[in-house]
Image: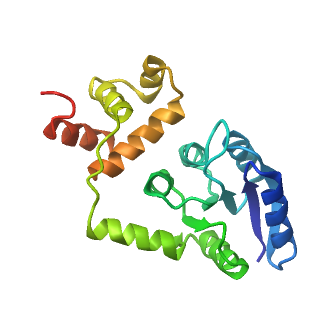
Amino acid sequence: MTITLLIADDHPIVRDGLRGIFTGERGFEVLGEAAHGAEAVTLAEALRPDVVLMDLRMPGTDGVAAITELARLGNPARVLVLTTYDTDSDVLPAIEAGATGYLLKDSPREELFRAVRAAARGEAVLSPAVASRLMGQMRAPAQEPLSQREIEVLGLVARGSTNKEAAKKLFISEATVKTHLLHAYAKLGVKDRAAAVAVAFERGLLGS
């Protein structure tokens, strides 16, 4: 069975390298390439690949926003994040947004093949470094403070604003609002808007 792929990365040399790796390996077919998140969403909808290899930090629509949009659209592609970054602010939002796996770009070729095959089967895939980071968080959750912007976004949400309305009031994109919310969820240890607002009020972050 051939696994079809879409490669999303803003660096042409990385896309060329990945295409070469998978083209030369039996059982894989690269259907297309995207240079940013919005293009990745468009191509994923048109080509319907089994797996999207998604970079995170891209101009315009970033990887997390693209993953979020694919989930909203109900696109069946599994998203395997392939990035250089393994910080909490990168890993958690990507997983919360719906990524099936998270792999670093310095992973060996065979590990990349195994990860793509596992992602295509719907199995969660994490590089050892990322898995260790998440396990550490589970054992000792960090009490990282919310940024001023995250508090502003939560305040607007608490007053009934939608993401679109909050974006307009703060003069930022809707995708950025979603990213701030995901960061706030991770820091507060919650999974949705209502819980985030409740915990924020309990901690005195939104006044009384």
Q: Which residue occupies the foreground of this view, 206 or 113?
A: 206
Where is residue 69? Give x, y as percent.
57, 42
Q: Say above or below: 33 vs 164.
A: below
Answer with the quarter of the image where residue 15 lies: bottom right
Residue 196's image quarter?
A: top left
The residue drawn where x is 63% and y is 38% is 61
Q: How is the image coloured?
A: rainbow
Instruction: Count the numbered circles shown.
Output: 0
Residue nearer the viewer, 134 or 197: 134
Residue 92 point in image, percent of width and height: 44, 56
Q: Is residue 111 left or right of residue 196?
A: right
Q: In this picture, is 64 found above or below 161?
A: below
Classify residue 80 by image quadrant: bottom right
Quick check: 11 left or right of 129? right
Quadrant where the C terminus is found in the figure? top left
Note whether residue 191 is visible.
Answer: no
The image position of residue 46, as x and y in percent, is 76, 47
Q: Is residue 23 left or right of residue 97?
A: right
In percent of the image, x 52 and y 71: which residue is there?
Answer: 126
Q: Residue at x 42, y 38 (%)?
A: 180
Q: Residue furthest top?
A: 169
Please tell me which residue lies in front, 21 or 45. 21
Q: Is residue 154 visible?
A: yes
**Residue 21 drawn at (x, y percent):** 82, 72
- Residue in front for this viewpoint, 108 or 197: 108
**25 displayed left or right of 49:** right
- Residue at the location (50% across, 20% down)? 171
Q: Quadrant of the N terminus?
A: bottom right
